Image (tube, rainbow, N blue to C red):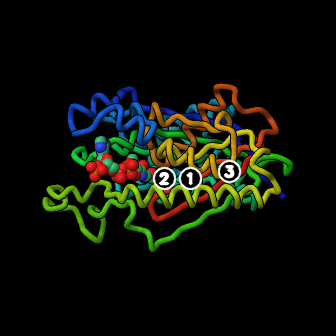
């Protein structure tokens, strides 16, 4: 029997910073409202010539360097994204080419903001089964390309970025202890991008009505997010015979500070055990958890033997968790 160990993390955020004050210039909002209702102060925006694979490749190279792994050793690359470079080929194939991982199989996963947890679970299964020994998991998004910059209910929330982890087959007493994935397709319309696919193909009408942009039922999504994240945490804790107080770090999807605080209250976890970076990056969808994990790892917040719970929710509706013993 094998387990997957996270042997390297990496992340990348575009250089351009967009603050809440910058948003005040383009929509009717205020820094005070955004900071109080979401915890977000600024987000990063990709430059015109940066696509998702560009962000993903830099995060991947940083994770590989951290892991001390040659790209040619990779067996599999999985990219979680809702903003792929193109309809096809997969962004994972483009990343494979950029980083020179010529031996690897590569594919994308679409699970919106839960994408990284879904991709991690898939990668973990390949390692546990003994099929692959070195796997690269990436969450990467250029959300700014699917945002309606006239919709103040969504444009204040999202940002661009990428995070990556390298999984390696390892001993059974540490690594990814469990993953749990869930979906409820009946709630598909809480957050979605209606146009540009096979249902409503690209057209001038799609662009005029901004159907190629995110539509979200904010307050309904908020309530479901608190419920699913709390349930997912309890499920992961129970599966590993752990109590909330046993956790060393909680890394939740960085959607809204008030969602995270409500979940933390339900679990009765100390706030200093929660990794939060949404004040600086906003909601980077599938990139948010691996970006936060990388920051925590590089700041020295993670020690060997620590119990780390990562959990996400997002469009689909999808949600899930990964419990790691570092
Ligand atoms: O990764 C998953 C992605 N989605 C989420 O996690 C989103 C979850 N939902 C949320 O984070 C929150 O629902 C929002 C931050 C999107 C909105 O916060 P809210 O507290 O649910 O506000 P609301 O939509 O109920 O609106 C309250 C008021 C409204 O005004 P009235 O009707 O009370 O006069 C809105 O028009 O706030 C107004 N409002 C704004 N005001 C200033 C909504 N957006 C803004 C804004 N600036 N950007």
State the separation of the CA atoms marked 3 and 1.
15 Å
Residue 253 lies left or right of residue 74; in this view the side is: left
Point out the image quarter for the N terminus: bottom right
Q: Dividing the image into 4 quarters, which one contains the C terminus? A: top right
Q: Is residue 313 left or right of residue 44?
A: right
Q: Badges 1 and 2: C-beta atoms under 8 Å apart? A: yes
The image quarter containing residue 212 is bottom left
Q: Nearer the viewer, residue 174 or 232?
A: 232
Q: In the rendering, at what x and y percent does residue 63 appear?
A: 61, 35
Residue shown at the point (69%, 47%) measured from the top left: 268
Q: Which residue is mark 1?
A: 312
**Which residue is identified by label 2?**
113
Above or below residue 303? Residue 128 is below
Q: Position of residue 258 (x, y in %)?
A: 50, 45
Q: 10 Å neighbourhood of mark 2: few (<14), some, or many (≥20)?
A: many
Q: Position of residue 65 (x, y in %)?
A: 63, 30
The circle drawn on residue 267 is: 3
């Amino acid at each position: 029997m094998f387990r997957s160990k996270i042997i390297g993390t990496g992340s990348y955020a575009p250089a351009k910073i967009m603050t809440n004050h910058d948003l005040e210039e383009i929509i009717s909002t205020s820094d005070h409202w955004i900071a109080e209702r979401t915890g977000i102060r600024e987000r990063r925006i990709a430059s015109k010539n940066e696509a998702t694979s560009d962000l993903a490749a830099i995060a991947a190279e940083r994770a590989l360097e951290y892991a001390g792994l040659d790209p040619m050793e990779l067996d599999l690359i999985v990219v979680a994204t809702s903003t792929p470079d193109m309809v096809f080929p997969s962004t994972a194939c483009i990343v494979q080419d950029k980083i020179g991982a010529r031996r690897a199989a590569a594919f994308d996963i679409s699970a919106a903001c839960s994408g990284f947890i879904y991709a991690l679970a898939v990668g973990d299964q390949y390692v546990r089964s003994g099929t692959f020994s070195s796997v690269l998991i990436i969450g990467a998004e250029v959300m700014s390309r699917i945002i309606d910059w006239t919709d103040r209910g969504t444009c204040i929330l999202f940002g661009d970025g990428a995070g990556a982890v390298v999984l390696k087959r390892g001993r059974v007493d540490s690594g990814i202890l469990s993953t749990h994935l869930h979906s409820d397709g009946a709630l598909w319309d809480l957050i979605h991008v209606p146009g540009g696919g096979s249902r409503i193909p690209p057209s001038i009408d799609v662009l005029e009505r901004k159907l190629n942009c995110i539509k979200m039922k904010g307050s309904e999504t908020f309530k479901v997010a608190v419920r699913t994240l709390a349930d997912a945490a309890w499920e992961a804790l129970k599966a590993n015979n752990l109590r909330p107080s046993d956790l060393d770090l909680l890394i939740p999807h960085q959607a809204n500070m008030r969602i995270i605080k409500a979940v933390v209250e339900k679990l009765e976890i100390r706030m200093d055990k929660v990794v939060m970076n949404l004040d600086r990056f906003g909601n980077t969808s599938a990139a948010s958890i691996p970006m936060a994990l990388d920051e925590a790892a590089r700041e020295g917040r993670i020690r060997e033997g620590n119990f780390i719970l990562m959990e996400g929710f997002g469009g689909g509706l999808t949600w899930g968790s990964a419990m790691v013993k570092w």
